[in-house]
Image (cartoon, grey):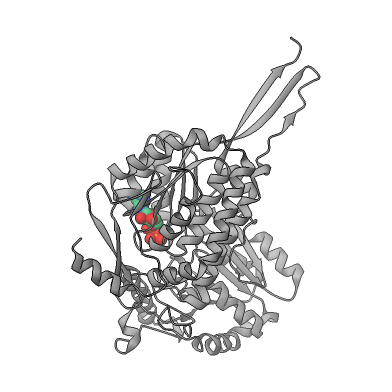
Amino acid sequence: MSTAIAEMKTQAQPAGTYKPKGMLIGGKWVESASGARIIIENPGKRTAVAEVPRAGEADVNAAVEAAEKAFPAWKNVVPRERGKILLKIAEVLEARSEEMARTIALETGNALRTQARGEAKLAADIFRYFGGLGSELKGETVPLGEHVLSYTRREPIGIVGAIIPWNAPVMLGALKIAPALCAGNVLVMKAAEDAPMAVLLMADICQEFLPPGVLNVLTGYGQECGGPLANHPKIRKLSFTGSTEVGKVIMRAAAERIVPVSLELGGKSPSIVYPDADEDWAVDGIINAMRFTRQSQSCTAGSRMFLHEDIFDSFLRKLEKKTTALKIGDPLDEASDIGTIINNKQYTKVCKYVQDGLDRSDAKLVFGGLPPKTGPLSEGYFTMPTVFADRSNDWRLAREEIFGPVLVAIRWSDEAEAIRMANDSHYGLAAYVWTHDIGKGLRAAHAIESGWVQVNQGGGQTPGMSYGGYKQSGLGREFSLEGMLDSFTQRKSVTVNLAV
Ligand code: ADP
């Protein structure tokens, strides 16, 4: 890289954000073997702000080798001592959370005040949660008789290959690193090509406390770097968060070598609003569940809203008033509630869905629409929260994951029909039910085919809850103690004949 480019990049990167030093392999910051780099864009201004290495197969091999060297010593560190290291990391993550939040906002386009700060704090919380769980890697004794001692051990699996997306990169990265390392595994993690900077900051903080090679973080593209990682013969476990489409590719790679795989994939999550919930708290909850303030770039976004016919128009009026009052603007501006879509590809995709809705004669645009073509919002990938009202659950906008702020409102009158429509999807990640009648709410929660149903709230995940998908939304759970045990340990039985 020439000095001129380096200076230009330095000037372009706003104060208080993290400057990448390379990728982390074996405790060292390195460039890719090929020397190639990826330019990182600020989606709020469509400008280049930094460069990171563009890893390929040779870099994957080097990272796996470093992890392999680190594994024997790391798996023998007393689990509570491993936990203590995670707790120290949590302290520094907390102390540097503003730098982390600004970096997240810069590269993802997620608004600093409403999104990025919360994500940075959550990452520290995730390390803290798993840091306390070292002693919980317990086995059992099995009563096979007076002269037999049979017990189980929770052993680490080995080298874990993790691949994460860009939408909440630090939270999702923390959710791989903390449980995998607490359980005694070593990790090679690939950051998303669009948002690697904050993940590199997290790696930088981790490597101050971890032995070299225990955590390796690569920056690279999906097929070029994620492909060789998923297919590497020495990777003993694959943990992937991203689209269902790529999840299938990862599962095929896992099948070739019979390695366990955890998949956190897409969603098209339903929200069922009962007639007694035509109130402000439910409207606020719907806005939250739809993640409008994260441009709805969330797998748990409640993007299909089943509204009872008696409150259909009145609820939509309230939703319009509250949603259109949210301020869309520069993600790094404290005043912004809503930031930008991550990149041009996703922006174009979201706009196409909006155009499809506008072109459909029987779908009514309630509010929103295509983004402005002029003015400050045209300088970044800003989109408008958009709601279409339609009778059908069958059209493209109600079936496909848009990963943008497009919500469809569908009328219902019969509860069984609402639940049937809610379940009529190949996804099953999250769901939301809104009613004062808790009996009704819980009956619906039990009938919905989703890994996580929230009643009367639309919040995000909290460490400790087992979170993951039904159907094509995923496999395995990683957010909890049980998730750590299931996803990052393997159980060994030892049976001893005491009669000799
Ligand atoms: P998103 O819609 O969030 O971009 P993707 O599933 O495309 O979801 O990407 C999630 C992660 O998977 C990213 O880190 C991306 O680079 C990686 N990825 C994409 N394609 C592949 C692939 N063929 N093999 C391995 N990793 C991939």
Q: Residue at x 61, y 51 (%)?
A: 130
Image x and y of residue 217, in percent: 40, 50
**Residue ranking furthest to the top:** 500
Image x and y of residue 276, in percent: 70, 81
**Is residue 259 shown above or below 226?**
above
Q: Residue at x 53, y 73 (%)?
A: 290
Q: Residue at x 40, y 35 (%)?
A: 234
Image x and y of residue 435, in percent: 70, 75
Q: Residue at x 33, y 87 (%)?
A: 376
**Is residue 128 shown above or below 105?**
above
Q: Is residue 298 visible?
A: yes
Q: Nearer the viewer, residue 96 or 475?
A: 96
Give residue 309's quadrant in the image.
Answer: bottom right
Give residue 445's quadrant in the image.
Answer: bottom right
- Specify whether 154 is left or right of 49: right
Q: Is residue 157 visible?
A: no
